[in-house]
Amino acid sequence: MWAIRVTARLWRSNGGVHPRGDERLQWVKGEERTALLVLISGCFRVELPGRNVLLDQQGDYVGWGRGVDHSWFAEEESVVLTVRWPSVPGYAVAG
C-alpha cells in the first residue's frame, strides 16, 4: 500500500525551485534514505561519487541508494521534485 504524507515542512522556503547558480554548499554524507530526483524544468546537475548527472530535459531523473554521498548545482533556474524514503522522524536540513 502506498501513502503520501504532506506536511508544512515538505518544501524548503524556496520549494523545489533553484535559481541559476544555486548549489549545495556541502556534500550530503551518510544519507540514510534512498532518493529519486525528477527535473520539472531547467537544467540541474547532480554530483555523485565518480559521476556527474546532467538533467536537461523535462522528466529526466536520477536515483541513488542509501549511503551514497551527493551534491547538486542548478545550471539554469530549475524546478525539481525529490522523493526520499523511508521517512526519517525529525529530519531537517539546516539553512
Image (spheres, rainbow, N blue to C red):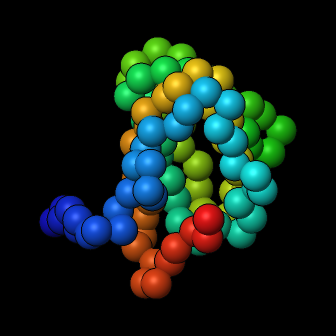
Q: What residue is shown at x 49% (from left), y 29% (from top)? A: 78
**Residue 4 at x, y = what percent?**
20, 62
User: Is 4 rendered above or below residue 43?
Assistant: below
Q: Is residue 86 left or right of residue 51?
A: left
Quadrant that contains the C terminus:
bottom right
Q: What residue is shown at x 50% (from left), y 53% (from top)? A: 35
In the foreground, 71 or 8: 8
Asked if residue 45 shows in the view, the reply is no
Q: How many marks?
A: 0
Q: Is residue 85 left or right of residue 62?
A: left
**Residue 91 at x, y = what percent?**
50, 77
Q: Going by the picture, which residue comes out furthest to the top?
A: 57
**Residue 27 at x, y = what percent?**
76, 55
- Residue 23: image quadrant is top right
Q: What residue is shown at x 42% (from left), y 70% (from top)? A: 86
User: Is 41 rendered above or below residue 37?
Assistant: above
Q: Going by the picture, which residue comes out furthest to the right?
A: 50
Quadrant that contains the N terminus:
bottom left
